[in-house]
Image: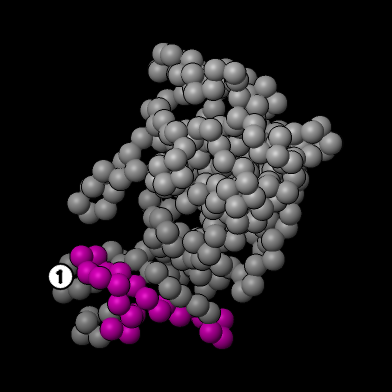
Protein backbone atom coordinates (compact mmCIF):
# COMPACT_ATOMS: atom_id res chain seq x y z
CA UNK A 1 0.00 0.00 0.00
CA UNK A 2 2.76 2.44 0.87
CA UNK A 3 4.33 1.87 -2.55
CA UNK A 4 0.98 2.70 -4.17
CA UNK A 5 0.72 5.95 -2.26
CA UNK A 6 4.24 6.96 -3.24
CA UNK A 7 3.45 6.92 -6.94
CA UNK A 8 3.47 10.15 -8.95
CA UNK A 9 0.07 11.06 -10.31
CA UNK A 10 -1.87 13.97 -11.83
CA UNK A 11 -5.33 15.19 -10.94
CA UNK A 12 -7.48 16.97 -13.53
CA UNK A 13 -10.48 18.76 -12.02
CA UNK A 14 -12.20 22.07 -11.46
CA UNK A 15 -15.39 22.11 -9.40
CA UNK A 16 -16.49 21.45 -5.82
CA UNK A 17 -17.16 17.84 -6.89
CA UNK A 18 -13.45 17.57 -7.77
CA UNK A 19 -12.46 18.80 -4.30
CA UNK A 20 -14.73 16.24 -2.62
CA UNK A 21 -12.96 13.48 -4.57
CA UNK A 22 -9.54 14.95 -3.75
CA UNK A 23 -10.37 15.15 -0.06
CA UNK A 24 -11.42 11.50 0.12
CA UNK A 25 -8.18 10.52 -1.64
CA UNK A 26 -6.13 12.70 0.71
CA UNK A 27 -7.78 11.14 3.77
CA UNK A 28 -6.89 7.70 2.35
CA UNK A 29 -3.27 8.81 1.89
CA UNK A 30 -3.22 9.60 -1.83
CA UNK A 31 -1.87 13.06 -2.67
CA UNK A 32 -1.31 14.12 -6.31
CA UNK A 33 2.02 15.46 -7.56
CA UNK A 34 0.21 17.95 -9.81
CA UNK A 35 -3.27 19.44 -10.13
CA UNK A 36 -4.36 20.62 -13.59
CA UNK A 37 -7.37 22.94 -13.57
CA UNK A 38 -8.90 25.83 -15.53
CA UNK A 39 -7.89 29.52 -15.39
CA UNK A 40 -9.35 31.89 -12.78
CA UNK A 41 -12.68 33.37 -13.92
CA UNK A 42 -14.71 36.49 -13.01
CA UNK A 43 -17.64 35.67 -10.72
CA UNK A 44 -20.53 37.39 -9.02
CA UNK A 45 -22.14 40.73 -9.70
CA UNK A 46 -18.82 42.53 -9.28
CA UNK A 47 -17.08 40.02 -11.60
CA UNK A 48 -14.24 39.40 -9.17
CA UNK A 49 -11.49 37.16 -10.59
CA UNK A 50 -11.92 33.90 -8.66
CA UNK A 51 -9.76 30.75 -8.65
CA UNK A 52 -11.38 27.34 -9.25
CA UNK A 53 -12.02 25.25 -6.15
CA UNK A 54 -9.27 22.78 -7.02
CA UNK A 55 -6.64 25.53 -7.19
CA UNK A 56 -7.59 26.66 -3.69
CA UNK A 57 -7.36 23.04 -2.49
CA UNK A 58 -3.97 22.48 -4.17
CA UNK A 59 -2.43 25.60 -2.64
CA UNK A 60 -3.79 24.68 0.80
CA UNK A 61 -2.26 21.21 0.54
CA UNK A 62 1.09 22.24 -0.96
CA UNK A 63 0.45 20.62 -4.34
CA UNK A 64 1.74 22.14 -7.60
CA UNK A 65 -1.04 23.52 -9.81
CA UNK A 66 -1.23 24.72 -13.42
CA UNK A 67 -4.16 26.37 -15.21
CA UNK A 68 -3.77 25.99 -18.98
CA UNK A 69 -6.36 27.67 -21.21
CA UNK A 70 -6.15 24.62 -23.47
CA UNK A 71 -4.58 21.15 -23.38
CA UNK A 72 -4.22 21.06 -27.15
CA UNK A 73 -0.69 21.55 -28.52
CA UNK A 74 -2.10 23.52 -31.46
CA UNK A 75 -3.56 26.11 -29.11
CA UNK A 76 -1.02 25.80 -26.31
CA UNK A 77 2.39 24.76 -27.70
CA UNK A 78 4.57 22.94 -25.17
CA UNK A 79 1.74 21.94 -22.80
CA UNK A 80 2.66 18.23 -22.92
CA UNK A 81 6.28 18.91 -21.96
CA UNK A 82 5.18 21.38 -19.29
CA UNK A 83 3.08 18.70 -17.61
CA UNK A 84 5.88 16.13 -17.96
CA UNK A 85 8.35 18.56 -16.35
CA UNK A 86 6.62 18.19 -12.96
CA UNK A 87 7.83 14.58 -12.79
CA UNK A 88 11.01 13.98 -14.81
CA UNK A 89 10.82 10.25 -13.97
CA UNK A 90 7.29 10.07 -15.40
CA UNK A 91 3.77 9.90 -14.03
CA UNK A 92 2.27 6.57 -13.04
CA UNK A 93 -1.43 7.41 -13.43
CA UNK A 94 -3.94 10.27 -13.52
CA UNK A 95 -7.39 10.91 -12.09
CA UNK A 96 -10.05 13.06 -13.77
CA UNK A 97 -13.11 14.38 -11.93
CA UNK A 98 -15.28 17.21 -13.26
CA UNK A 99 -12.47 18.86 -15.22
CA UNK A 100 -14.73 20.41 -17.85
CA UNK A 101 -12.38 20.20 -20.84
CA UNK A 102 -11.67 17.50 -23.41
CA UNK A 103 -8.34 15.77 -22.74
CA UNK A 104 -6.52 14.99 -26.02
CA UNK A 105 -4.75 11.70 -26.70
CA UNK A 106 -1.20 13.03 -26.23
CA UNK A 107 -2.16 14.07 -22.67
CA UNK A 108 -3.92 10.74 -22.05
CA UNK A 109 -0.65 9.05 -23.00
CA UNK A 110 1.45 10.84 -20.33
CA UNK A 111 0.75 8.50 -17.36
CA UNK A 112 1.99 5.03 -18.26
CA UNK A 113 -0.75 3.17 -16.36
CA UNK A 114 -3.54 5.32 -17.79
CA UNK A 115 -6.22 7.68 -16.48
CA UNK A 116 -9.28 6.99 -14.38
CA UNK A 117 -12.38 9.17 -14.44
CA UNK A 118 -14.83 9.60 -11.54
CA UNK A 119 -18.21 10.15 -13.21
CA UNK A 120 -21.36 10.95 -11.18
CA UNK A 121 -23.82 8.65 -12.96
CA UNK A 122 -24.45 4.96 -13.55
CA UNK A 123 -22.71 4.69 -16.90
CA UNK A 124 -23.56 4.12 -19.69
CA UNK A 125 -26.50 6.29 -18.59
CA UNK A 126 -25.97 10.06 -18.59
CA UNK A 127 -22.69 10.44 -20.37
CA UNK A 128 -21.70 14.07 -20.86
CA UNK A 129 -21.47 17.44 -19.18
CA UNK A 130 -24.43 17.57 -16.77
CA UNK A 131 -25.01 14.15 -15.14
CA UNK A 132 -26.03 15.58 -11.75
CA UNK A 133 -28.67 17.92 -13.14
CA UNK A 134 -29.85 15.40 -15.73
CA UNK A 135 -30.33 12.68 -13.12
CA UNK A 136 -32.55 15.01 -11.10
CA UNK A 137 -34.51 15.99 -14.21
CA UNK A 138 -35.01 12.55 -15.74
CA UNK A 139 -34.02 9.69 -13.42
CA UNK A 140 -35.22 8.24 -10.12
CA UNK A 141 -31.84 6.91 -8.99
CA UNK A 142 -28.16 7.48 -9.68
CA UNK A 143 -24.67 6.61 -8.51
CA UNK A 144 -20.97 6.88 -9.33
CA UNK A 145 -18.75 5.14 -11.86
CA UNK A 146 -14.97 4.76 -11.96
CA UNK A 147 -13.91 4.22 -15.57
CA UNK A 148 -10.77 4.05 -17.66
CA UNK A 149 -10.56 7.21 -19.72
CA UNK A 150 -10.23 7.00 -23.49
CA UNK A 151 -10.50 9.54 -26.30
CA UNK A 152 -14.32 9.32 -26.51
CA UNK A 153 -16.64 10.94 -23.98
CA UNK A 154 -17.39 8.73 -20.95
CA UNK A 155 -16.92 5.73 -23.19
CA UNK A 156 -14.16 3.70 -21.50
CA UNK A 157 -14.41 0.40 -19.63
CA UNK A 158 -15.76 0.39 -16.07
CA UNK A 159 -13.43 -0.27 -13.13
CA UNK A 160 -16.08 0.06 -10.40
CA UNK A 161 -19.64 1.31 -10.01
CA UNK A 162 -21.90 1.97 -7.04
CA UNK A 163 -25.56 2.93 -6.82
CA UNK A 164 -26.12 5.61 -4.16
CA UNK A 165 -29.31 5.70 -2.08
CA UNK A 166 -30.78 9.20 -2.08
CA UNK A 167 -33.56 9.91 0.37
CA UNK A 168 -36.40 12.23 -0.68
CA UNK A 169 -35.88 12.15 -4.45
CA UNK A 170 -35.48 14.51 -6.26
CA UNK A 171 -32.58 16.09 -4.32
CA UNK A 172 -31.19 19.57 -4.81
CA UNK A 173 -28.15 19.59 -7.11
CA UNK A 174 -25.80 20.76 -4.35
CA UNK A 175 -26.94 17.90 -2.09
CA UNK A 176 -26.46 15.33 -4.84
CA UNK A 177 -23.01 16.71 -5.68
CA UNK A 178 -21.98 16.33 -2.03
CA UNK A 179 -23.24 12.74 -1.82
CA UNK A 180 -21.71 11.57 -5.10
CA UNK A 181 -18.42 13.46 -4.64
CA UNK A 182 -17.74 11.75 -1.32
CA UNK A 183 -18.98 8.39 -2.60
CA UNK A 184 -16.87 8.61 -5.77
CA UNK A 185 -13.74 9.56 -3.83
CA UNK A 186 -14.19 6.72 -1.33
CA UNK A 187 -14.88 4.16 -4.07
CA UNK A 188 -11.80 5.31 -5.99
CA UNK A 189 -9.57 5.20 -2.89
CA UNK A 190 -10.81 1.68 -2.19
CA UNK A 191 -10.28 0.33 -5.72
CA UNK A 192 -7.12 2.23 -6.70
CA UNK A 193 -4.51 -0.11 -5.13
CA UNK A 194 -5.97 -3.18 -6.84
CA UNK A 195 -6.33 -1.36 -10.17
CA UNK A 196 -2.70 -0.22 -10.04
CA UNK A 197 -1.65 -3.78 -9.24
CA UNK A 198 -3.56 -5.12 -12.25
CA UNK A 199 -6.01 -7.07 -10.08
CA UNK A 200 -9.22 -5.54 -11.48
CA UNK A 201 -10.81 -6.78 -14.68
CA UNK A 202 -12.45 -3.79 -16.35
CA UNK A 203 -15.92 -4.23 -17.87
CA UNK A 204 -16.84 -2.87 -21.28
CA UNK A 205 -19.85 -0.57 -21.19
CA UNK A 206 -23.00 -1.63 -23.02
CA UNK A 207 -22.88 1.21 -25.54
CA UNK A 208 -26.36 0.40 -26.88
CA UNK A 209 -27.80 1.54 -23.52
CA UNK A 210 -25.93 4.85 -23.49
CA UNK A 211 -27.84 8.07 -22.85
CA UNK A 212 -26.36 11.54 -23.12
CA UNK A 213 -26.79 14.84 -21.31
CA UNK A 214 -26.10 18.26 -22.75
CA UNK A 215 -24.27 21.32 -21.53
CA UNK A 216 -26.71 23.48 -19.56
CA UNK A 217 -27.56 26.93 -20.86
CA UNK A 218 -29.01 29.81 -18.84
CA UNK A 219 -32.28 29.60 -20.77
CA UNK A 220 -32.83 26.01 -19.61
CA UNK A 221 -33.85 27.35 -16.21
CA UNK A 222 -37.09 28.92 -17.50
CA UNK A 223 -40.14 27.62 -15.60
CA UNK A 224 -43.46 27.30 -17.36
CA UNK A 225 -45.77 27.37 -14.37
CA UNK A 226 -48.39 25.56 -16.49
CA UNK A 227 -46.16 22.45 -16.60
CA UNK A 228 -46.70 19.61 -14.16
CA UNK A 229 -45.74 20.21 -10.54
CA UNK A 230 -43.22 17.36 -10.61
CA UNK A 231 -41.55 18.63 -13.79
CA UNK A 232 -41.09 22.07 -12.26
CA UNK A 233 -39.93 20.71 -8.90
CA UNK A 234 -37.26 18.65 -10.66
CA UNK A 235 -36.18 21.69 -12.65
CA UNK A 236 -35.97 23.90 -9.53
CA UNK A 237 -33.84 21.34 -7.71
CA UNK A 238 -31.66 20.43 -10.71
CA UNK A 239 -30.81 24.06 -11.47
CA UNK A 240 -30.53 25.10 -7.82
CA UNK A 241 -26.82 26.01 -8.08
CA UNK A 242 -26.84 27.31 -11.68
CA UNK A 243 -28.49 28.77 -13.70
CA UNK A 244 -31.43 28.92 -11.28
CA UNK A 245 -35.00 27.99 -12.27
CA UNK A 246 -36.95 31.17 -12.90
CA UNK A 247 -40.24 32.66 -14.03
CA UNK A 248 -41.30 36.19 -14.89
CA UNK A 249 -43.71 38.22 -12.76
CA UNK A 250 -45.39 41.56 -13.28
CA UNK A 251 -44.46 44.29 -10.80
CA UNK A 252 -46.16 47.53 -11.64
CA UNK A 253 -45.46 48.18 -15.29
CA UNK A 254 -42.30 46.03 -15.27
CA UNK A 255 -41.68 42.34 -15.88
CA UNK A 256 -39.07 40.93 -13.48
CA UNK A 257 -37.20 37.63 -13.34
CA UNK A 258 -37.82 35.60 -10.17
CA UNK A 259 -35.45 32.73 -9.35
CA UNK A 260 -36.93 29.93 -7.25
CA UNK A 261 -34.41 28.64 -4.69
CA UNK A 262 -36.59 26.29 -2.62
CA UNK A 263 -39.79 24.41 -3.43
CA UNK A 264 -41.71 21.27 -2.51
CA UNK A 265 -44.83 19.33 -3.40
CA UNK A 266 -48.02 19.29 -1.28
CA UNK A 267 -51.05 17.29 -2.39
CA UNK A 268 -49.56 17.09 -5.86
CA UNK A 269 -49.17 20.85 -6.18
CA UNK A 270 -45.96 22.86 -6.42
CA UNK A 271 -45.27 24.98 -3.34
CA UNK A 272 -42.77 27.80 -3.86
CA UNK A 273 -40.89 28.51 -0.61
CA UNK A 274 -37.84 30.72 -1.25
CA UNK A 275 -37.27 33.07 -4.18
CA UNK A 276 -34.80 35.71 -5.34
CA UNK A 277 -36.59 38.50 -7.24
CA UNK A 278 -34.47 40.43 -9.74
CA UNK A 279 -32.32 42.99 -7.91
CA UNK A 280 -33.34 41.70 -4.47
CA UNK A 281 -32.06 39.29 -1.82
CA UNK A 282 -33.55 35.87 -1.12
CA UNK A 283 -36.96 36.01 0.59
CA UNK A 284 -39.93 33.78 1.29
CA UNK A 285 -42.39 33.43 -1.55
CA UNK A 286 -45.11 34.66 0.80
CA UNK A 287 -43.19 37.91 1.37
CA UNK A 288 -42.66 38.27 -2.38
CA UNK A 289 -46.38 37.86 -3.04
CA UNK A 290 -47.22 40.50 -0.46
CA UNK A 291 -44.85 42.87 -2.25
CA UNK A 292 -46.83 42.48 -5.46
CA UNK A 293 -49.92 44.13 -3.99
x, y percent for residue 283: 30, 77
Quadrant assignment, res 277:
bottom left
Residue at the spot 16% in from the left edge and 74% down from the top edge = 252
**41 inside magenta stretch:** no
Residue 234 picture location, percent across and down: 53, 65
Is 255 rendered above or below residue 287?
above
Q: Please, which residue is most extreme toward the front here?
A: 2
Which residue corresponds to the image point at 33% horizontal and 39% vertical from the top-left? 40
Occupied quadrant, residue 89:
top right
Q: Residue at x 40, y 79 (%)?
A: 273
Q: How would you rate the neighbour count of disc 1 (Cα within 10 Å): few for under 14, some for 14-19, many for 20 or more?
A: few
The residue to which callout 1 is attached is 253
Residue situated in front as seen by the camera: 253 or 11:
11
Give how far across and how far down residue 65 sits, in percent: 43, 34
Position above or below: 262 against 133:
below
Residue range (magenta): 266-287
Hey, which residue is sitting farthest left in the picture?
253
User: Residue 202 at x, y = what percent?
Assistant: 80, 36
Q: Nearer the viewer, residue 262 or 73?
A: 73
In the image, is 111 to the left or to the right of 64? right
Quadrant of residue 92 within the rendered picture: top right
Quadrant into which the N terminus falls: top right
Name the residue located 45 percent from the left edge and 19 percent from the top edge: 82
Q: Quadrant of the C terminus?
A: bottom left
| Membership of 276 in magenta stretch | yes
Could you tell me how many numbered marks the image carries? 1
Above or below — where is 88 with respect to 162?
A: above
Do we see residue 133 in this rendering? yes
The type of colouring in the image is one colour
| Residue 130 shows in the view | no
Mark 1 residue element: loop
- Vertical side of 3 occupied by 26: above or below: below
Amino acid sequence: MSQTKNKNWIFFGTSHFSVLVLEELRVAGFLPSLVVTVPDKPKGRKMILTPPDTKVWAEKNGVSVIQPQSLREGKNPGIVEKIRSFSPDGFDFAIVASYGKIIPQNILDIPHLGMLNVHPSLLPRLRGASPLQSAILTENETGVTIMQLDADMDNGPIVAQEKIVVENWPPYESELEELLGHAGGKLLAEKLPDWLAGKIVETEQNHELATFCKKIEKEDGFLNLEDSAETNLRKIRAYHTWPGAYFFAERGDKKIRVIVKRASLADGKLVLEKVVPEGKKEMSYADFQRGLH
